[in-house]
Image: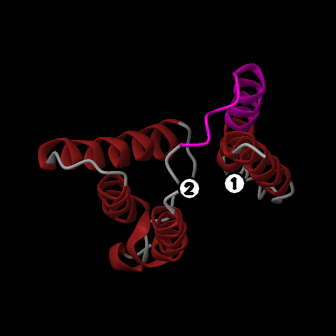
Amino acid sequence: MRPDLIVGAVTFLLGAVVAVEAHRIPDSGTDAIGPGTFPFFLGIIIALCGAATVFSALKSAPEAEDHEPVRWGVVWTAFVLLVAYTFALAYLGFPLATVILVPAMLLLLGTRDVKGISVSAVAVSGAVFLIFGKVLGVDLPLGLVFGG
């Protein structure tokens, strides 16, 4: 079976599970939008990306057998980084944990431009914190480090 088809299907299922589980998060009624809104839409976006990958795989011709092998070390390292990130959110808070995660992921994917990595880390963390934390009123964790 083709790897792109498998990745697309797994991504779609993962996104669907995230969306369903996020929809089950009870609304406390204290925020303008509930705590499950961000992960719900994130799950929908992940599922749509998975579906697009599946349709692209079905539409394209099968790849030749001499394709590059899956870099399982990168896949597992990314998984470990995401798990560590979820635990770090409680201690470091969203802004600091994200400023650490983004460069780690970019380095893992092969980016070596230090300036670009630094700008990306601050921009992603700041933009998401401002948009979701301030504009939309979503309570993002500040972490124990910052008294959250």
Q: Quadrant of the C terminus?
A: bottom left
Residue furthest left as drawn: 115
Where does the magenta region start and end? 48-66
Badge 2 element:
loop
Residue 88 is left or right of residue 62, and the answer is: left
- Contact between marks 1 and 2 (CB within 8 A): the answer is yes
Residue 56, image x, y percentages: 70, 25
Residue 59, image x, y percentages: 75, 20
Query: What's the residue at 55%, 67% (across, down)?
Result: 79
Q: Amino acid at mark 1?
A: Pro
Tell me the tag on residue 139: 2
Q: Nearer the viewer, residue 72 or 36?
A: 72
- Say few, some or many: other residues with alpha carbon within 10 Å of mark 2 (under 14 / 14 to 19 / 20 or more): some
Residue furthest top as drawn: 59
Query: What's the residue at 38%, 76% (across, down)?
Result: 147
Look at the picture and state if 87 lies above or below 64. Answer: below
Residue 14, image x, y percentages: 76, 53
- Say few, some or many: other residues with alpha carbon within 10 Å of mark 1 (under 14 / 14 to 19 / 20 or more): many
Magenta-drawn stretch contains 12: no
